[in-house]
Image (cartoon, rainbow, N blue to C red):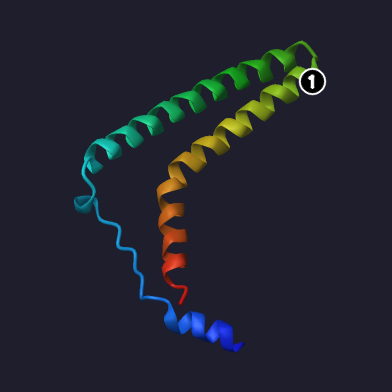
C-alpha cells in the first residue's frame, strides 16, 4: 500500500448508508408506484407468453420453422422476464448485502 493510498484511507470519513422508508417523504407513494409498474410488467410478460405460444403452435402446425422458433423464443424470453421481475427485490437485497460487507 502506498503512502498516498494510506493517507487517503485514513482521511476518509466514516460514511454509512441505512435505507429507511420513514426517512424519505413520499416513500409509500413511491412503493405503490413500483408495485404498479411490477404489475404492468407482469401483464406484459403474460401477453408476450400467450402471443409467443400462439406463434409457436401456428408455426409448428403450418411447418413454418422460423415462426415456430420465434414463438418459442417469445415464450422463453417472457418467462425469463417474469422470473427477473419476481426475483428483483431479492436480487437487490442480495447485492446490497454484498455491498455492505465491503470494508
> 22 or 79: which is nearer to us?
22
Reply above or below: 85 against 97.
above
Q: Position of residue 39 (x, y in %)?
A: 38, 30
Residue at point 66% right, 16% down? 55
Q: Is residue 45 left or right of residue 34?
A: right
- Image quarter where the N terminus lies is bottom right
Q: Position of residue 4 (x, y in %)?
A: 57, 84
Q: Position of residue 40 (x, y in %)?
A: 41, 26
Q: Which residue is mark 1?
A: 66
Q: Position of residue 44 (x, y in %)?
A: 49, 24
Q: Is residue 32 left or right of residue 87?
A: left
Is residue 1 visible from the viewing direction of this image?
no
Residue at point 61% right, 87% down? 2
Reply above or below: 86 against 90.
above
Residue at point 45% right, 84% down? 10
Is residue 42 visible from the viewing direction of this image?
yes
> 102 or 97: which is nearer to us?
102
Residue at point 62% right, 21% down? 52
Callout 1: SS: helix
Amino acid at each position: 500500500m502506498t503512502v498516498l493510498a494510506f493517507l487517503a484511507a485514513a482521511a476518509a470519513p466514516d460514511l454509512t448508508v441505512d435505507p429507511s422508508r420513514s426517512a424519505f417523504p413520499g416513500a409509500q407513494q413511491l412503493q405503490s408506484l413500483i408495485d404498479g409498474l411490477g404489475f404492468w410488467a407482469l401483464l406484459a410478460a403474460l401477453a408476450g407468453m400467450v402471443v409467443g405460444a400462439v406463434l409457436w403452435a401456428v408455426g409448428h402446425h403450418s411447418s413454418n420453422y422460423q415462426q415456430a422458433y420465434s414463438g418459442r423464443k417469445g415464450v422463453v424470453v417472457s418467462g425469463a422476464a417474469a422470473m427477473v421481475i419476481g426475483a428483483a427485490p431479492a436480487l437487490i437485497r442480495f447485492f446490497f448485502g454484498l455491498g455492505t460487507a465491503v470494508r
